[in-house]
Amino acid sequence: MNKNESVVRLTNVTKTYFMGKVEVEALRGITIQIPVKRFNVIIGPSGSGKTTLLNLLGCIDFPSSGQMEVCGQEVARMNDKQASDFRAENIGFIFQNFNLVPVLSAYENVEYPLLLMKKPAAERKQLTLKMLDAVGLSKHQNHRPNELSGGQRQRVAIARALVKGPKLVLADEPTANLDSKTGKSIIDLMYAMQSENHTTFIFSSHDKQVMEYSEKVFEIRDGLLVKEKEN
């Protein structure tokens, strides 16, 4: 894929939830193309559909209708096993609450996606140590999450997302639980790693610092794409 191609193509995608007997239209016909190998951000108020959209892009959930192509594959009709395999191969996730495994060390958390992919032990070690070094945590590799600061935990999460060399990284409010200084250092790190690895990042964020770094901004309101702009 070159920079003029799209890593995501959605055509008239809808997502409807049922809360008891109440029907909730989270997405109401999204048509969007998100460029590859860039920093992209999805903005919008709470309840606008941002997280729902990220869940669809990550194949954690599936659309109610419409066509959805991610990393060159039609994913809307995948079954659970196909979606799980697709995620493992193509997608990294970064969450605002870090979602690290508390009983595992930083090293083991980063190594975990490689175990799921059944990578050989020597390759796992090489990739894990390289990624921990890239995020500045080589000296903390044996620390568990509760022995790390919020910023350090998010660095572990970034390393875990990138260690398998994904085509796409989805980041849901990755700086929301960090102070502004730490948040900026995390954005700087992700921007540097995106440039180095040529990975596509898609953020959901309210953070103005994230928007300043982003090369393309998509605004969603009430489940609809209302604006997109180049930065």
Image (cartoon, rainbow, N blue to C red):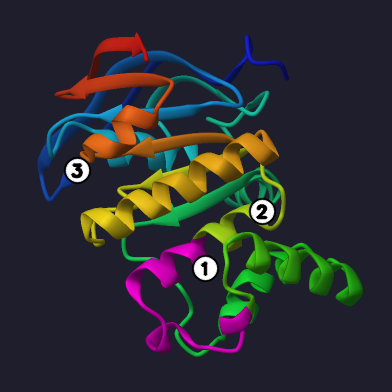
The Cα–Cα distance between marks 1 and 3, rounded to whole angstroms, is 36 Å
Label 2 crowd bin: few (<14), some (14–19), many (20+), radius 10 Å = some
Tell me the kind of residue under disc 3: Phe
The residue where tag 3 is placed is: 18
Stretch of the chain drawn in magenta: 139-157
Nearest to the observer: residue 97 or residue 126 = 126
Q: Position of residue 211 (x, y in %)?
A: 30, 30
Tell me the kind of residue under disc 2: Ala
Write the residue at 66% across / 46% down: 82
Which of discs 1 and 3 lies nearer the camera? The answer is 1
The residue where tag 1 is placed is: 156
The residue where tag 2 is placed is: 88
136 shown above or below 4: below
As helix, strand or loop, the secondary structure at mark 3 comes to strand
Describe residue 113's horizontal placement relative to residue 30 as left or right: right
Q: Position of residue 18 (x, y in %)?
A: 19, 43
Dominant SS type (magenta): helix
